[in-house]
Image (cartoon, rainbow, N blue to C red):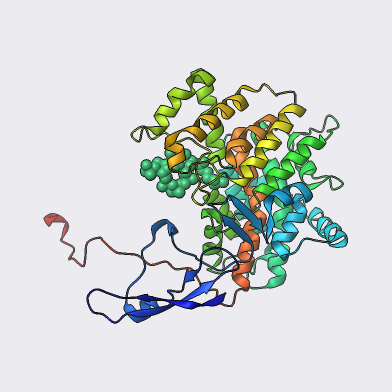
C-alpha cells in the first residue's frame, strides 16, 4: 500500500473535532481511505451494508475493472490466460504469483495428480446422504469432512500445512464432485486416472463406467478447462469474503473452504448458472423465442420479482469479459456435439439481443455475466443442472485458497469482526410471564 500525498478530512456539523484520514494508493483501481482509527478517535463506525464502498483487505491476486469489463489474475488479462494457459498453470499463478516455467508446471501437475484420490472412508460418509440431496448440500459436507480425514494439514498458521491443504483441495475437488454425481445416479465411483489432464480426469470420473473405455473429447476437455480458468478467482466476492472471514478465526483450511462452498450455493452468486438454465427451460416450456417479449415484460415489472438470471453483476457495469469467452466456448462445444441448433442456445441469444438493446437494461448497465453461457455449455457436456454450482466450487477452490493464504500471511491480518448500527429495543426489564 503506497500512502498518497492527499489526505481526507472528516468534519462534523456539531462542532466535534475533525479527523484527518490517510489515503492509500493501489497499483490500479480506486484509492482507499484508511478508517482504522475512526472508532478510536471519534467513537463512530462507518455504515456500509453489502460493502458497496469498503475494501476489506489489500490483495495482489485478482483485479477487476467493472466499468471497463477487465479481469486480471496477477496482472494477466483473463482473455490471454484462457487462450494460452491451462487450469493448473492458472492455479500455480494464483497461488504463487507467477506463471510456472515448464519444469515448475510439470512438478506442480505431478504434485496435484498425486493427491487426486480421497480417503476410502469418504465414500461411507457420502453414503449417509439421501441420494436426491442437492450436490451443493453434499459438497458442503464433503469438503468440511476433509478436515476429519487429513489431520496433518489442519493448522492454518503452519505454512507447510497450508501448502499441502491447498494441493489436497485442488486435487480432490474433482474427485468429490464426481463422487457426489455418481452417488446421485447410483453408478459406481470411478477412481482418478493420473495420466489424464485435470479436466480430462474429471470428465472420466463423471461419465465413465467400469463397463467400457471412456475416451475424453479434446474439445470438451478444453471447454471444461476454460470454465475452470474463468471461475478460478474473482477478488473479494461473497464466497471469497466468507472464506477470509471464516479463516480469520484460525479455523482449518478445509473448514474455511467449506464455508465458501456454502456461500457460493446462493442464487445471487454461484447458484446463478443453475437458476439461469432453469429460467431458459421455463421460457422454453412457455413457448420459447416467441415468448421472450412477454418474459422481458415480467423482468421489467418490479412487482413480479422476476430477474433475468445471468444478467447483472455487482462489480461489472459492462460486458463481463468471461461471458465473451464463454460464448465462444459455447459455440465450439455445441458444434462439436452437433447441437448448433440447440433451442436453449437460440433462446439465450434472443434474450441477450433484446436485453442489450432495451432501455431498462442499458440504463442500469446490466450485461450478461459468465453464468449466462456456462450453464448451456455444461448442459451440453452432459452435466446435470443441479451440479453446475459444484463445478463452480471446484474451479473457485484455488482462488479461495490463494486468498486465504494471502490473508494469513499478511502481517496486518486480524480476526474479522464487523460492527453494527443497533436499532432495536434499548435496555428494558423482563416482565414475569403473567404480566406479558
Ligand atoms: N434482472 C432484472 N433487473 C435487474 C437484474 C436482473 N438480473 N439485476 C439487477 N437488476 C436491477 C435491479 O432491480 C435494480 O433496479 P432499480 O435500480 O430500478 O431498483 C438495479 O438493476 C440494480 O440492481 P441491484 O440488485 O441493486 O444490483 P446489485 O449490484 O446489488 O446486484 C446481482 C447484482 C445480485 C448480481 C443482480 O444483478 C442479480 O440478481 N442478477 C441475477 C443473478 C445473477 O446472474 N447472479 C450472478 C452474479 S455473477 C456470479 O456470481 C458469478
Residue 299, quarter of the rendered image: top left
Q: Give the image location of residue 379, x and y in percent.
A: 65, 31
> What quarter of the picture does the C terminus occupy?
bottom left
Q: Can residue 131 be seen by looking at this rendering?
A: no
Quarter holding residue 373: top right
Q: Please name whichever residue, 63 or 277, is drawn nearer the observer in this view of the structure.
A: 63
Residue closest to the eye, 99 or 129 = 99
Q: Is residue 95 left or right of residue 369?
A: right
Q: Is residue 295 above or below residue 44?
A: above
Q: Which residue lies at the image location 69% right of the left edge and 72% below the top edge?
A: 159
Q: Position of residue 189 (x, y in %)?
A: 74, 39
Q: Position of residue 333 (x, y in %)?
A: 73, 32
Where is 134 relative to 397, above or below?
A: above
Q: Is residue 408 above or below residue 351?
A: below
- Image-quarter location of ligand 1: top left
**Residue occupying the point 15% across, 61% down:** 431
Give the tally of numbered discs. 0
Looking at the picture, how far across and down is residue 296, in whole percent?
A: 44, 28
Q: Residue at 56% across / 65% down in the picture?
A: 247
| Camera-nearest residue between 166 and 144 | 166
The quarter of the rendered structure image containing the N terminus is bottom right
Q: Is residue 108 visible?
A: yes
Left or right? Give the position of 318 relative to 336. left
Residue 100, quarter of the rendered image:
bottom right
Establish if 153 lies above or below 203: below
Amino acid at each position: 500500500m503506497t500512502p498518497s500525498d492527499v489526505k481526507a478530512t472528516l468534519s462534523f456539523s456539531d462542532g466535534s473535532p475533525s479527523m484527518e484520514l490517510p489515503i492509500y494508493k493501489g497499483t490500479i483501481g480506486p484509492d482507499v481511505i484508511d478508517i482504522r482509527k475512526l472508532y478510536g478517535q471519534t467513537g463512530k463506525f462507518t455504515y456500509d451494508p453489502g460493502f458497496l464502498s469498503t475494501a476489506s483487505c489489500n490483495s495482489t491476486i485478482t483485479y477487476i475493472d467493472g466499468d471497463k469489463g477487465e479481469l486480471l489474475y496477477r496482472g494477466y488479462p483473463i482473455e490471454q490466460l484462457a487462450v494460452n494457459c491451462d487450469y493448473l498453470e492458472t492455479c500455480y499463478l494464483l497461488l504463487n504469483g507467477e506463471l510456472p516455467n515448464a519444469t515448475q508446471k510439470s512438478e506442480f501437475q505431478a504434485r496435484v495428480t498425486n493427491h487426486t484420490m480421497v480417503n476410502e472412508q469418504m465414500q461411507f460418509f457420502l453414503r449417509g446422504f439421501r441420494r436426491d440431496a442437492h450436490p451443493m448440500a453434499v459438497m458442503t459436507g464433503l469438503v468440511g469432512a476433509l478436515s476429519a480425514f487429513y489431520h496433518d494439514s489442519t493448522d492454518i498458521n503452519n505454512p507447510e500445512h497450508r501448502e499441502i491443504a491447498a494441493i489436497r483441495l485442488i486435487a480432490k475437488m474433482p474427485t468429490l464432485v464426481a463422487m457426489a454425481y455418481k452417488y446421485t445416479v447410483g453408478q459406481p465411483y470411478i477412481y482418478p486416472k493420473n495420466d489424464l489432464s485435470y479436466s480430462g480426469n474429471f470428465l472420466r470420473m463423471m461419465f465413465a463406467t467400469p463397463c467400457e473405455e471412456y475416451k475424453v473429447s479434446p474439445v470438451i476437455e478444453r471447454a471444461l478447462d476454460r470454465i475452470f480458468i474463468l471461475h478460478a478467482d474473482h477478488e473479494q466476492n461473497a464466497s471469497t469474503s466468507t472464506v477470509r472471514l471464516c479463516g480469520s478465526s484460525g479455523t482449518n483450511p478445509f473448514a474455511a473452504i467449506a464455508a465458501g462452498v456454502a456461500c457460493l450455493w446462493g442464487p445471487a452468486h454461484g447458484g446463478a448458472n443453475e437458476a439461469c438454465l432453469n429460467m431458459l427451460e421455463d421460457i422454453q416450456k412457455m413457448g420459447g423465442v416467441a415468448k421472450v417479449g412477454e418474459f422481458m415484460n415480467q423482468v421489467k415489472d418490479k412487482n413480479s420479482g422476476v430477474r433475468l438470471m445471468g444478467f447483472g453483476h455487482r462489480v461489472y457495469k459492462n460486458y463481463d469479459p468471461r461471458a465473451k469467452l464463454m460464448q465462444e466456448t459455447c459455440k465450439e462445444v455445441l458444434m462439436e456435439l452437433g447441437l448448433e441448433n440447440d433451442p436453449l442456445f437460440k433462446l439465450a441469444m434472443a434474450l441477450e439481443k433484446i436485453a442489450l438493446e432495451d432501455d431498462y437494461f442499458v440504463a442500469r448497465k446490466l450485461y450478461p455475466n459468465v453464468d449466462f453461457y456456462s450453464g448451456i455449455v455444461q448442459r451440453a457436456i452432459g452435466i446435470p443442472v443441479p451440479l453446475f454450482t459444484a463445478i463452480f466450487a471446484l474451479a473457485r477452490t484455488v482462488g479461495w485458497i490463494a486468498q486465504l493464504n494471502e490473508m494469513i500471511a499478511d502481517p496486518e491480518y486480524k480476526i474479522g469482526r464487523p460492527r453494527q448500527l443497533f436499532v432495536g429495543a434499548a435496555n428494558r426489564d423482563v416482565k414475569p410471564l403473567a404480566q406479558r
